[in-house]
Amino acid sequence: MVVKREEIEIEGISIILERKNIKNLYLRIKPDGTVKVSSPKRLSDDAINDFVLSRIDWIRETRAKMLENPPKPKVKYKDGETHYIWGEPYTLQLISNDNAKKAFYDTKEHIIYLPVPKRSTIKQREKILFELYRDEMNRNLDYFLHKCTYFVGKEPKEIKIRNMKNWGNCRKDKRVTLNLKLAKKPPICTEYVLIHELCHLIEFNHGPRFKALMDNFCPNWREIKQLLNEEQ
Ligand SMILES: [Zn+2]
């Protein structure tokens, strides 16, 4: 795709304008505050100008918010970083120990020990920590399952722990999957996700009947959902 890129200024805001082979105008503000407009090739400057002006207040507000809250530094799984287990903060400590293959943690000192090979990559370190989360989830799965199936009155055919994008999943064949990263969050979050998935054994979609089930089995699910999706 041929892209013509230029920088324009509207109302004192500099904008990167890209003209390309698309049908509609798009406006995007990147986390660093850069405003980017993508436009169909032959659209006039006036039309682009009008489009940006119609959104100028939103652009100003959104940029101001973004620049106030800069994006969080990327997680690198380095010494001293804070990571969470069941909602509690721990300091990460990298160790090189041939005997220890798995990560472990000290609840008194609040340290997670991460055994890593020399010159490990971020991905490798993440994988070791994620295995700890997986173990935590597996270790507590019976407890969660017992409690939540008691509430909902339904049992899954199978339950699995995986690293995945969503927090949980329930298939039509009654197999439930939970995200291993739930082990980072307070236990109530796993309960909420599991109750949600078990409610799908009664009602497959997220309609009013589903919400009524959630209100019944987990009355404060809305607050828990918010807690779950907070950055941590
Ligand atoms: Zn659902």
Image (spheres, helix red, strand yellow):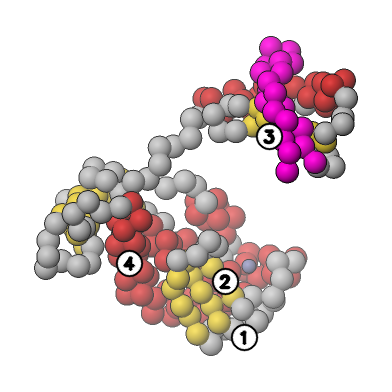
Q: Secondary structure at mark 4?
A: helix
For label 2, the residue is: 169
Q: Which residues are magenta?
A: 1-21
- Using residue 149 as the reference point, say whether residue 89 is left or right of it: left
Q: Answer yes or no: do the residues labelled 4 and 1 have beta carbons within 8 Å?
A: no
| Quadrant in the picture for residue 166 | bottom right
First along the sequence among labels 3 and 1: 3
Judged by depth in the image, the label closer to the viewer, 4 or 1, is 4
Q: Residue 64: give x, y in percent of width and height.
A: 59, 23
Q: Is residue 27 above or below residue 121?
A: above
Question: Does the beta carbon at disc 2 come under 8 Å from ligand 1?
Answer: yes
Q: Amino acid at mark 4?
A: Glu
In the image, residue 73 lies at what x, y percent? 40, 37
Say what secondary structure mark 1 lies in: loop
* Rendered view: 110 above or below 43: below
Mark 3 vs mark 1: in front: 3
Look at the image and tell me whether residue 88 can be seen. Answer: no
Label 2–label 4 contact, CB within 8 A: no
Identify the residue at horizontal 44%, vertical 37% (top origin). 72
Q: Which residue is mark 3?
A: 28
Of 150 and 118, nearer the camera is 118
Camera-near label (2 vs 4) is: 4
Residue 131: x percent and y percent?
32, 67
- Report helix, strand or loop for mark 3: strand
Tell me the quarter of the picture where residue 197 sits.
Answer: bottom right
What kind of residue is marked 3?
Answer: Arg
